[in-house]
Image (cartoon, rainbow, N blue to C red):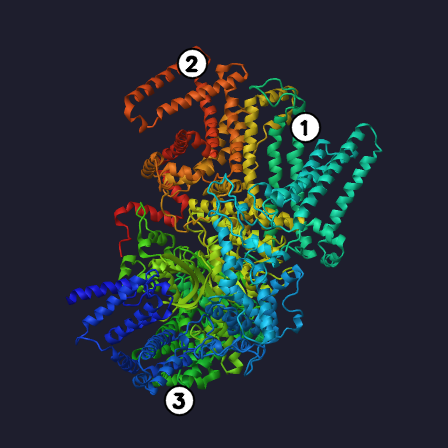
């Protein structure tokens, strides 16, 4: 029975602990009763109790049972009916354990009255056993003694032990106290005597640091955390205390005994804020105030007081948006006079605002709504203060109590949630529901005050919409509140609507240039008169804009301000009238001109009107760019006429006011655009327009009478279609070439800016070595805090002292950089030793440089000296030519003296020291006399070096008697060599000394007593000199690792770049790093690393081959042989964990990101530590030696506290709670990261489900956790949310819920696939000072930071993406910031002005679909709200990119779709309207315009080819060519045969090339670029062109943009043909096939005078485009041309194609399911119409080709075309006969077969007869296929667009069968070339080398050869 009970208890224990998600450092799971208590219980104590029970289980099972019973009773009280999720299972399991304990207990029954006594006795015993009283004393002693000891591990062990013991004691004491309440007071007094109570209270006081806190322990005075002793923190805390003006709170209001009442307690009582929101914002406000105070440099006082200036700054920064909102609406803020507001009142308002913000949940996206709430709550607060009676505010009172979230936030949340629910997961039109912007903009007018306070919930604003019908063709009906001020209608017209000024300008310029060209370039009166026709063009286009204003506002009229609606219609009327008048005047002027009336009054009037209007426009736009004029204009607002004119000119929004720049900045970007436009219009006139003028005139006048087809459109209209076919590509190029010129000019500009900023000056390892001696001074100038006396040292001796001091202060930072490179396995141990720099704090009077610079230099100098036959000066000159050779000689000279002097005995006659002094005096004397080569036999130097090396080799070891004897012998040998072999001077001058030494030598007492090196400095010097004398190989290639080189090159280069002065850590701006995470890889598991693909290649094997040197360094670091396999590591769990981290640090994992970001803390700790030591030089008498000793910097409590006050890191793991509950490995890995990084905080959304009234109710909490001493999460804050926070896009909602836990003045947004470097972290405080630098009219609000793409070495595709990305994030963004002033936020790793953004809606926007590119909208928002975005390149952050073609395509599709949605957005519209003209152009061409120009590039190809096909099929081309030949008109021939080689790709490569040249040098840039060409980068970029075009266009037409996870893994596996086909069939293959079809038709029927060569030149770029689109996915597919895989792919593809699918079948499994998914984006009526119109182009082929058939002869009647449709119908009927459903025909199978056979025979016979009897030829049959294929596709596209109609008429199955046939045919056509290439093995080999670097290519081949012997065996 006992065995059964044992098994049962083990089972229950396993169920209870649920394989806890945390685990220990090795990832092992915790055992015992400790468990994740069901979140629905919501009690933090139960888990602590069970943990303590588990801990003391072995010590006393009875006490463990008592604790379990108490935990059970707590859970029973919290949820008596077990309605919460998991509660019943938890209780059952816990009760089972308790019963087992009772049953197993010896001695029968249990006397529960004895429980308290047992607990009491155990409490005493546990205290004694663990020696509690001494634990704290030992820890404090260790802390005090360990500041420089570096004994961090011992301290951590002691701290953890103390905290564990105290935590258990705390639980025991609490349970004891609770149990005593169940007995009588007398009994309790007896059981727990007063003495024990005092002990328990004392123990409880020692656990104050166990009270959960984030950074600053405010709820309990923590004496072990120095942060609370900082004067700025103490001042901030004391400033929040209860002040005299606050009414007294009732006695029932409880406050922790460890702190006094403060203003947050008062606000909690008044408004019912949540307890954890109060705690969170208390710390937040203290943090802000403390950091602001620290920047004021206030002298430390005994009782520090918060300065008024610090409060004022935080107040104005926090409430700036509220003040502006009040001013905009014309209302008074809560205060009437700001100067009269006291410091305490300001703190009260700051606290209130942040408490509102902290609990607002999704309402944080509505910043002006928060202003409205704050305005009214502050008024309530003022009234309460006036009455001096503490009472709950009316707005927050309900029947259930006082609750801010229930009464204020929930009503808003409910209506936002209802509207979000109506968007049908983003599928509904944007116009059908209100998004976050609509809700927020409601508060931009005084109408918002109709909502009253408390909320008037009957307002239409709170009206919830009727749920929408799923059928989008039907109206949803029902009442709803309309959109606010803007409607995101889905149409391309938004591009014109938002940027109409650009299109008007381009149209007018095109019109003007064309008119000049048609007037032969003569600018005479006639030409000018014609050019003035741009006037009507301008006004008609403005009229069209006003019409669009009316159309685009449809859906928002009911809720928009009347003034806004009035303005729209007034502008419509004014431009209607203006366009009519101007057109009329110009028409009359032309009329009068034709009547030969040169003195036309109408014409003069027209000129006057146009000139006046244009002059006024230019004058006003000029005035707009002078800030003084802006101020004058603002003053003029009091005049109604001025106000009316401004209002008519531009809509007045709350955002977007004052969007002008400094006059100097304006001039810069204006000149930039003058250059761009100058090039663009010159190109357009001379190369596009003018060459076509002559041919156009001829074509218009040529009477073409011979057409190949039945002509409808070209007769009697001057060949308009021919002219259009020539001009359409030209117009398209005219519209897009401005982007090309922008690209080229911005690249050149960016190159010059980069050169000015000194980028790329250090671009090689040789440059690092050569310039190293300049680094310490550069470091001190830029990265070190300015030292007061440093610049005063000028003399030569002082200069040496300055250089030595600089080197001493630089050395610890440099060494820490090198140490971190070693820890990251980029360098080996030897390389680390060579690269590290001596401390330079010793007594040697020279600067000691790293051995890497001096290695082998001494031997070169020796060789020069030995071979020298010249004078001393020439010898020294030869040595001094190499600075580092000179330094090596000097250091060796002085070091030998230093060491010998130190070790030779002081006792007796000092013979040893006298010998050293004598030798050195003789050497220095000889040098002074210039006769060293005479007095010393330099050819014997190798002998001296040999003897010194032997001596040092002995001295570097630990002292032993044998070694002492050896050392004496070595010195004697050295003495003999010097005495007899080296010296050739006259010894008589110092006869006494030499005689004494000789006598001592003879007597055997010379050097007999040595002082063995014990001093750390001396030992280091011995070791260094030994290395200097033994390293004979050059270290010119150290470090060998390319990444280590790149990082050192960039860091050292940045030392010479301009950056703000570094502030001391205490005075720097505080910042936090913020990373959103969902469910990506945290840490690779061994199973992931060892999992093999079909080639037997595992991820680990792949990494070992890609990073072979780093793998060897890793093995050396963990103490393994470099040839050890990973299977040998299995004997050590720690090594397995290190292996997982090693692999994860080379992927795009959260672990890599966390490690990188934690370097910020490490850097700050080092900087703070050294600053404290420097400051202590004088104050504490610390020597220079000590001030650069950093051995204990990570241990220093003050340094850690200072770093924590300045830096925080929050990772918002949205579903961490769910992952933890489901025991996902990601949760365990996140917990492991928290344990390894004490400053890491994890925020997540916890969902608590409870069962009430038979229904499941979910409650949502935003939680912050950190690691606790037990390796488990410790909950710091838990803030209840009004509902599910995910109403919009996932990532911004994830950021928004957690942003309340961030701290600091600045916030860096980091994605979870990024990295950081220690050396870059050192520059962060410089970067933060940019917020206070001059960057234009407004201070920066976003600091752009450079990125380095670290995935570039993975494959050729990865390198393409890396180079493309690098070009944009460096050179591109450099120009966007300066001079263009339009840089936005592109996702990461930008640094935000945190307070600015959190008070203005956050760091991203979140409305569903429209804000899918959420990051860039924060840049839009910042700019619109008078922010300023800058860019800085002296600091960089790592970034991972997608590495496989499919990942890249999905990513680019997401970005292109996001840009499509941006076109529709109000932000883009407002920026397009409110920017000045030049800034608007910059903005357009760097955001949506880039994608539109990309699409135009593709459309230009289509326009060109369709134009050629028209000329070919209609016969017009041949006719005109014949006439041109007769006339001998070469211009006409040239126009007809224009070689369309204008490729955007050629020019867009310019930024990449210039970026290479700047940062790599010209030669390396050329090699890199040529290498990319060999790797077919042009194919990749051309393919990407198609991706962007497809998704951008489709999104604007139909929507369908969505976030797509790209995987971010290593692409080492072959992608199946089916997967590629599914992904690219509609985006690339169909379009590629269409281009091929056009080219074939043109080849077959076109007329080319030059024959085949002319055709090739004309179409080569189009063939290349088509080929890239069709075959790039297979060209860049790993093992894409292996025959076996090709066969498997074909089998898989046919299975997929023929699988019928069904309900629940996904597109990856069945063609039918995929086909339905591909059509899902066509949902709206307008979308169906557009698809139909676009599909009509496919019918031109049949219409043209049937008239070219031999069978029809010269007949061009419509009968021929009609007959072709009959033939097509017959073919479709035959197809249906042969594809008749087998299910339906099961009963007449034989008859069906007979009919099919007869039909086939008849069809075959018909064709044979037709060929024999008629003129039908075999060529005609192929031509018919060419004609009918596109027609069928056109019919198919139209049928798909009208899918609901097709289903109703019963044709859908037939349509689907035809579609399957087309996909099968297209797949076969693509597959055939792949199969042919797969026949040849060399193709696969070539492709592997093309895709991967050589190391992996070799590794891959080896793995295939050794297929059965792969090294990755199981662990």
Q: Position of residue 825 (x, y in %)?
A: 39, 61
Circle 3 SS class = loop
As rendered, which of 20 and 653 lies closer to the eye? 653
- State if disc 1 and disc 2 touch (CB < 8 Å): no
Q: Is residue 1217 above or below residue 1011?
A: above
- Residue at the spot 59% in from the left edge and 33% down from the top edge: 729
Can residue 852 be spotted in the picture?
no
Circle 1 SS class = helix
Circle 2 SS class = helix
Task: Please state, as top left, top right, bottom left or bottom right, where the C terminus lies in the image.
Answer: bottom left
3 or 1: tag closer to the N-terminus = 1
The tag on residue 694 is 1
Question: Based on the displayed image, in which of its 4 quarters is residue 1268 positioned?
Answer: bottom left
Q: Which residue is mark 3?
A: 908
2 or 3: tag closer to the N-terminus = 3
The tag on residue 1127 is none
Q: Position of residue 1208 (x, y in %)?
A: 48, 67
Q: Which circle, 3 or 1, is nearer the viewer?
A: 1
Q: CA distance from mark 2 to mark 3?
A: 126 Å
The tag on residue 1811 is 2
Q: Position of residue 96 (x, y in %)?
A: 24, 66
Q: Is residue 1510 above or below residue 886?
A: above
Q: CA distance from mark 3 to mark 1?
A: 111 Å
């Amino acid at each position: 029975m006992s065995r059964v009970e044992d098994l049962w208890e083990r089972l229950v224990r396993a169920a209870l602990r649920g394989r806890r998600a945390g685990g220990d450092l090795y990832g092992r799971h915790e055992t015992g009763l400790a468990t994740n208590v069901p979140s629905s219980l919501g009690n933090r104590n139960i888990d602590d109790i069970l943990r303590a029970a588990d801990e003391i289980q072995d010590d006393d099972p009875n006490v463990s049972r008592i604790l379990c019973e108490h935990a059970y009773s707590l859970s029973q009280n919290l949820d008596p009916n077990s309605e919460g999720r998991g509660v019943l299972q938890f209780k059952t399991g816990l009760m089972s354990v308790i019963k087992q304990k009772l049953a197993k207990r010896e001695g029968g029954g249990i006397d529960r009255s004895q429980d308290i006594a047992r607990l009491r006795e155990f409490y005493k015993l546990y205290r004694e056993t663990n020696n509690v009283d001494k634990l704290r004393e030992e820890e404090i002693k260790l802390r005090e003694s360990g500041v420089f000891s570096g004994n961090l591990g011992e301290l951590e062990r002691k701290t953890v032990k103390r905290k564990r013991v105290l935590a258990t004691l705390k639980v025991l004491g609490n349970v004891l106290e609770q149990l005593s309440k169940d007995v009588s007071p007398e009994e309790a007094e007896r059981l727990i005597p007063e003495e024990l109570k005092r002990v328990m209270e004392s123990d409880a006081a020692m656990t104050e640091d166990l009270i959960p806190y984030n950074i600053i322990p405010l709820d309990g005075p923590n004496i072990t955390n120095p942060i609370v002793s900082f004067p700025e923190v103490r001042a901030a805390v004391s400033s929040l205390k209860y002040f005299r003006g606050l009414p007294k709170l009732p006695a029932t209001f409880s406050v922790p005994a460890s702190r006094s009442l403060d203003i947050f307690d008062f606000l909690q009582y008044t408004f019912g804020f949540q307890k954890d929101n109060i705690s969170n914002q208390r710390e937040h406000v203290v943090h802000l105030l403390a950091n602001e105070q620290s920047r004021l440099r206030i002298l430390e006082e005994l009782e520090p007081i918060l300065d008024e200036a610090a409060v004022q700054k935080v107040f104005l920064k926090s409430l700036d948006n509220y003040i502006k909102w009040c001013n905009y609406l014309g209302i008074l803020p809560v205060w009437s006079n700001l100067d009269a507001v006291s410091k305490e009142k300001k703190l009260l308002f700051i606290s209130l605002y942040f408490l509102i913000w902290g609990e607002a949940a999704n309402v944080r996206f509505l910043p002006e709504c928060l202003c409205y709430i704050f305005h009214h709550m502050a008024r309530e607060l003022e009234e309460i203060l006036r009455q001096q009676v503490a009472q709950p505010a009316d707005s927050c009172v309900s029947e259930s109590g006082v609750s801010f979230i229930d009464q204020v936030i929930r009503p808003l949340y409910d209506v936002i949630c209802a509207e979000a629910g109506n968007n049908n997961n983003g599928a509904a039109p944007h116009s059908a529901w209100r998004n976050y912007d609509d809700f927020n903009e409601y508060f931009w007018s005084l109408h918002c005050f109709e909502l009253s306070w408390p909320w008037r919930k009957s307002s239409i604003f709170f009206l919830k919409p009727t749920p929408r019908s799923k059928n989008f063709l039907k109206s949803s009906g029902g009442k709803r509140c309309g959109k606010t001020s803007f409607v995101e209608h889905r149409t391309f017209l938004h591009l014109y609507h938002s940027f109409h000024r650009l299109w008007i300008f381009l149209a007018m310029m095109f019109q003007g240039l064309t008119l000049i060209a048609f007037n032969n370039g003569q600018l005479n009166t006639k030409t000018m008169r014609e050019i003035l026709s741009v006037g009507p063009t301008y006004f008609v286009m403005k009229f069209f804009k006003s019409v669009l204003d009316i159309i685009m506002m449809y859906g928002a009229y009911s809720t928009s301000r009347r003034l806004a609606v009035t303005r729209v219609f007034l502008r419509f009327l004014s431009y209607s009238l203006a366009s009519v008048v101007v057109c009329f005047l110009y028409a009359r002027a032309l009329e009068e001109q034709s009547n030969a009336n040169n003195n036309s009054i109408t014409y003069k009037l027209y000129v006057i009107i146009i000139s006046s209007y244009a002059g006024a426009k230019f004058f006003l736009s000029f005035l707009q760019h002078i800030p003084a004029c802006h101020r004058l204009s603002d003053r003029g607002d009091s005049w109604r006429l001025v106000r009316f004119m401004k209002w008519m000119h531009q809509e007045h929004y709350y955002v977007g006011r004052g969007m002008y720049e400094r006059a100097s900045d304006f001039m810069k970007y204006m000149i930039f655009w003058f250059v761009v436009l100058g090039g663009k219009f010159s190109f357009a006139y001379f190369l596009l327009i003018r060459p076509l003028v002559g041919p156009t005139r001829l074509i218009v006048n040529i009477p073409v009478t011979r057409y190949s087809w039945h002509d409808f459109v070209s007769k009697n209209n001057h060949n308009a279609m021919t002219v259009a076919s020539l001009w359409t590509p030209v117009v398209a190029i005219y519209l897009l070439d401005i982007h090309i010129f922008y690209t080229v000019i911005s690249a050149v500009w960016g190159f010059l800016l980069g050169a000015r900023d000194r980028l790329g000056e250090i671009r090689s390892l040789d440059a690092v070595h050569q310039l190293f001696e300049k680094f310490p001074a550069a470091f001190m100038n830029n990265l070190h805090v300015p030292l007061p006396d440093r610049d005063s040292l000028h003399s030569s001796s002082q200069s040496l002292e300055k250089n030595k001091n600089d080197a001493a202060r630089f050395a610890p930072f440099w060494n820490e950089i090198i140490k971190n490179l070693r820890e990251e396995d980029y360098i080996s141990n030897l390389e680390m030793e060579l690269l590290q720099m001596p401390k330079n704090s010793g007594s040697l009077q020279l600067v000691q440089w790293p051995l890497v610079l001096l290695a082998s230099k001494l031997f070169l100098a020796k060789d020069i000296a030995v071979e020298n036959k010249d004078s001393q000066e020439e010898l020294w000159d030869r040595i001094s030519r190499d600075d580092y050779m000179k330094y090596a000689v000097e250091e060796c000279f002085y070091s030998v003296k230093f060491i010998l002097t130190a070790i030779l005995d002081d006792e007796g006659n000092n013979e040893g020291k006298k010998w050293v002094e004598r030798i050195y005096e003789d050497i220095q004397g000889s040098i002074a006399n210039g006769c060293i080569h005479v007095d010393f036999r330099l050819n014997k130097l190798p002998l001296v070096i040999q003897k010194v090396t032997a001596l040092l080799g002995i001295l570097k070891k630990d002292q032993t008697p044998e070694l002492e004897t050896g050392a004496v012998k070595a010195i004697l040998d050295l003495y003999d060599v010097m005495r007899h072999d080296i010296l050739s001077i006259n010894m008589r001058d110092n006869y006494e000394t030499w005689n004494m030494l000789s006598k001592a030598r003879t007597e055997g007492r010379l050097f007999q007593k040595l002082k063995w090196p014990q001093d750390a400095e001396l030992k280091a010097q011995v070791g260094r000199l030994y290395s200097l004398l033994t390293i004979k190989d050059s270290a010119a290639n150290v470090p060998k690792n390319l990444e280590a080189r790149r990082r050192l090159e960039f860091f050292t280069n940045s030392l010479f770049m301009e950056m703000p002065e570094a502030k001391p850590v205490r005075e720097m701006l505080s910042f936090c790093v913020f990373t959103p995470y969902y469910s990506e890889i945290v840490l690779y598991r061994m199973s992931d690393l060892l999992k093999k693909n079909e080639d037997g290649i595992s991820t680990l094997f792949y990494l070992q081959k890609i990073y072979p040197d780093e793998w060897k360094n890793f093995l050396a670091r963990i103490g393994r042989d470099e040839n050890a396999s990973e299977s040998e590591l299995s004997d050590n769990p720690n090594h397995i964990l290190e292996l997982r981290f090693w692999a994860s640090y080379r992927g795009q994992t959260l672990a890599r990101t966390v490690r990188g970001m934690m370097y910020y803390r490490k850097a700050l700790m080092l900087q703070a530590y050294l600053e404290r030591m420097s400051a202590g030089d004088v104050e504490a008498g610390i020597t220079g030696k000590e001030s650069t000793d950093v051995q204990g910097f990570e241990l220093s409590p003050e340094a850690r506290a200072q770093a924590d006050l300045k830096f925080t890191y929050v990772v918002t793991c949205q579903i961490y709670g769910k992952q933890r509950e489901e025991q996902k490995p990601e949760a365990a890995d996140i917990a492991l990261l928290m344990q390894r990084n004490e400053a890491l905080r994890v925020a997540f959304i916890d969902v608590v489900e409870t069962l009430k009234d038979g229904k499941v109710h979910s409650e949502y909490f935003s939680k912050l956790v950190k690691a606790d001493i037990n390796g488990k999460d410790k909950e710091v804050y838990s803030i209840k949310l009004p509902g599910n926070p995910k109403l919009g896009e996932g990532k911004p909602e994830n950021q928004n819920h957690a942003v309340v836990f961030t701290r600091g003045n600045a916030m860096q947004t980091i994605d979870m696939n990024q990295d950081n470097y220690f050396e870059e972290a050192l520059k962060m405080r410089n970067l933060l000072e940019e917020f206070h630098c001059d960057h234009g009219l407004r201070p920066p609000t976003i600091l752009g930071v450079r990125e380095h793409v670290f995935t570039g070495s993975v494959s050729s595709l990865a390198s393409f993406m890396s180079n493309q990305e690098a070009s944009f994030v460096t050179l591109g963004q450099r120009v966007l910031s300066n001079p263009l002033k339009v840089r936005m936020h592109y996702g990461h790793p930008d640094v935000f002005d945190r307070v600015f953004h959190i008070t203005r809606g956050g760091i991203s926007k979140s409305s569903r679909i429209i804000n899918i590119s959420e990051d860039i909208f924060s840049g839009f928002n910042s700019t619109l709200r008078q922010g300023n975005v800058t860019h800085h390149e002296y600091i960089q952050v790592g970034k991972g990119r997608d590495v496989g073609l499919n990942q890249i395509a999905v990513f680019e599709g997401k970005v292109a779709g996001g840009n499509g949605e941006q076109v529709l957005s109000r932000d883009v519209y407002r920026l397009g309207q409110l920017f000045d003209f030049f800034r608007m152009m910059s903005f357009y061409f760097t955001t949506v315009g880039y994608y539109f120009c990309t699409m135009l590039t593709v459309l230009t190809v289509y326009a060109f080819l369709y134009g050629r096909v028209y000329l070919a099929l209609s016969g017009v081309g041949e006719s005109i060519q014949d006439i041109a030949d007769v006339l001998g008109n070469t211009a006409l021939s040239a126009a007809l045969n224009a070689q369309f080689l204008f490729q955007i790709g050629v020019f867009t490569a310019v930024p990449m090339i210039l970026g290479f040249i700047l940062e790599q040098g010209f030669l390396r840039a050329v090699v890199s670029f040529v290498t990319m060409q060999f790797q077919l980068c042009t194919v990749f970029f051309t393919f990407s062109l198609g991706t962007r075009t497809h998704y951008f266009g489709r999104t604007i037409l139909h929507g369908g943009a969505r976030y797509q996870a790209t995987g971010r893994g290593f692409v080492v596996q072959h992608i199946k043909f089916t997967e590629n086909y599914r992904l690219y069939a509609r985006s690339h293959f169909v379009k590629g096939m269409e281009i091929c079809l056009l080219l074939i038709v043109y080849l077959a029927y076109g007329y080319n005078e030059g024959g085949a060569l002319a055709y090739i030149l004309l179409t080569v770029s189009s063939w290349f485009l088509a080929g890239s689109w069709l075959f790039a996915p297979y060209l860049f597919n790993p093992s894409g041309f292996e025959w076996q895989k090709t066969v498997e792919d074909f089998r898989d593809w046919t299975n997929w194609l023929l699988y019928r699918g069904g309900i629940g079948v996904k597109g990856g499994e069945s063609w039918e399911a995929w086909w339905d998914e591909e059509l899902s984006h066509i949902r709206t009526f307008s979308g169906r119409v557009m698809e139909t119109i676009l599909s009509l182009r496919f019918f031109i082929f049949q219409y043209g080709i049937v008239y070219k058939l031999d069978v029809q002869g010269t007949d061009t009647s419509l009968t021929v075309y009609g007959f072709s449709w009959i033939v097509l119908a017959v073919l479709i009927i035959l197809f249906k006969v042969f594809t008749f459903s087998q299910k339906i025909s099961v009963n007449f199978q034989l008859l069906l077969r007979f009919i099919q056979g007869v039909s086939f025979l008849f069809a075959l016979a018909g064709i044979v007869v037709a060929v024999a009897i008629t003129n039908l030829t075999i060529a005609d049959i192929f031509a018919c296929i060419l004609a009918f294929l596109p027609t069928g596709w056109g019919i198919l596209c139209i049928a798909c667009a009208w899918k609901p109609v097709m289903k109703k008429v019963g044709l859908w199955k037939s349509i689907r069968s035809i579609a399957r046939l087309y996909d099968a045919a297209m797949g076969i056509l693509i597959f055939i070339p792949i199969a042919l290439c797969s026949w040849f093995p060399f193709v696969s080999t070539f492709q592997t080398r093309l895709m991967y670097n050589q190391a992996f290519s070799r590794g891959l081949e080896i793995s295939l050869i050794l297929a059965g012997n792969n090294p990755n065996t199981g662990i």
